[in-house]
Amino acid sequence: MQQSEPSVDSIGIVLETADPERAWNALRFGITAVENGHDVSVFLLGDGVEAEEITDDQFDVRDRMEAFVDAGGDLQACGTCLEIRNSEESEYCPMSTMSDLLEIVTASDRVLTIG
């Protein structure tokens, strides 16, 4: 008798790096999950809030970020982490709080951290 896999409706991704390939892959995964019917939230934390500014010839992070949001994904950025870097929220990276991250973590069926 096979056990059925538990249902995964929502996925939280905590992105803690500005490494181009890691950020690009995190967003690609998020897009794939949204396209397959999952609710996906990405929370940019620490160096992750710098992801929108990544310029890399091979890994177009900004393009994947826009595609993720356009596909229906939820993207949030730690306000404190933005302030530390003298950065501001943007259309694709609204300023959020630890309470927002707590909501993502507690409401998600699975949480993936990429750092």
Image: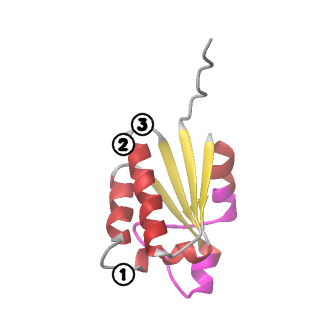
Classify the position of the C terminus by image quarter: bottom right
**Amino acid, disc 3:** Gly
| Residue 49 relative to residue 101: left or right | left
- Give the crowd class for mark 2: few <14, some 14-19, many >=20 residues within 10 Å: some
Residue 1 occupies quadrant: top right
On the question of residue 93 being in view, the answer is no
Residue at position x 57%, y 86% in the image: 85
* Magenta residues, start to end: 81-101
Residue pointed to by mark 2: 35
Disc 3 is placed on an element classified as loop
Q: Are discs 3 and 2 less than 8 Å apart at CB?
A: yes
* Structural distance between the alpha carbons of marks 1 and 3: 30 Å
Q: Residues within 10 Å of mark 1 (few under 14, many from 20)?
A: few
Q: Earlier in the sequence, mark 1 or mark 2?
A: 2
Judged from this view, the residue extending furthest toward the top is: 1
Disc 2 residue type (three-letter): Glu
Q: Position of residue 46 (x, y in %)?
A: 62, 75
- Number of residue marks: 3
Residue position for label 1: 55
Mark 3 — residue?
Answer: 37
- Report crowding for label 3: few under 14, some 14 to 19, many 20 or more residues within 10 A (C-alpha): few
Q: Secondary structure at mark 2?
A: helix
**Residue drawn 42% across the image and 74% down it:** 52
Q: Is residue 65 above or below residue 12?
A: below
What residue do we see at 51% from left, 83% from top? 87
